[in-house]
Image: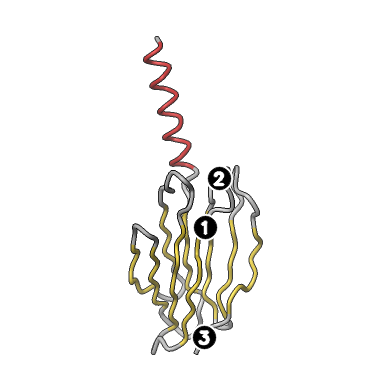
């Protein structure tokens, strides 16, 4: 019975981590049929480069490291010539009790917008607002 209880405890921890895994969503809300170039990286992972067509998005979820120091940096470039760009910290933990949540980034004509989705144990949820201007 002890082994079964231990198994259920470990299984519940795994399921909780899967359900509450932190993630990043990059959405292309640009106009005029422009594509969005995206590349994100952490100390251990590289995502992209990827081209996100207008009106679509790309999401990825990841397991945080033990010390909750996982940080992702992203660069977005606006098509068709990709000369307008922005590089930024796309994800980081606020504290050890923070589960991260979904960090939602949206590329628009006037800049990059940010929203941090509110889930259980997510610290400091953020409503959608403009975070960065494009760099020429």
**Mark 1: which secondary structure?**
strand
Name the residue: 43% across, 83% down: 34
Colouring of the image: secondary structure
Asked whether, in this view, residue 42 is left or right of residue 125, the answer is left
- Camera-near label (3 vs 1) is 1
List x then y, in percent, for residue 133: 58, 81
Q: Quadrant of residue 46?
A: bottom left
Judging by the rendered image, the residue that carries numbered circle 3 is 135
Front residue of this view, candidates 95 and 109: 95
Which residue of the protein is positioned furthest toward the top in this rendering? Answer: 1
Q: Are marks 1 and 2 in contact (CB under 8 Å)?
A: no
Q: Earlier in the sequence, mark 3 or mark 1?
A: 1
Quadrant where the N terminus sits is top left
Neighbourhood count class around disc 3 (C-alpha, 10 Å): few under 14, some 14–19, many 20 upward: few
At mark 2, the secondary structure is: loop
Residue under label 1, please give it. Answer: 92
Decide which of tag 3 and tag 2 comes sooner along the chain: 2
């Amino acid at each position: 019975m002890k082994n079964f209880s231990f198994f259920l405890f470990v299984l519940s921890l795994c399921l909780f981590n899967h359900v509450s895994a932190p993630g990043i969503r990059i959405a292309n809300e640009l106009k005029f049929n422009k594509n969005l170039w995206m590349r994100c990286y952490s100390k251990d992972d590289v995502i992209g480069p990827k081209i996100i067509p207008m009106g679509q998005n790309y999401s990825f979820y990841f397991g945080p490291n033990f010390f909750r120091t996982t940080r992702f940096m992203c660069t977005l470039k606006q098509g068709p010539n990709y000369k307008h760009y922005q590089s930024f910290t796309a994800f980081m933990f606020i504290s050890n009790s923070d589960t991260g949540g979904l960090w939602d980034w949206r590329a628009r004509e006037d800049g990059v917008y940010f929203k941090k989705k509110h889930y259980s144990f997510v610290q400091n949820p953020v409503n959608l607002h403009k975070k960065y201007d494009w760099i020429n």
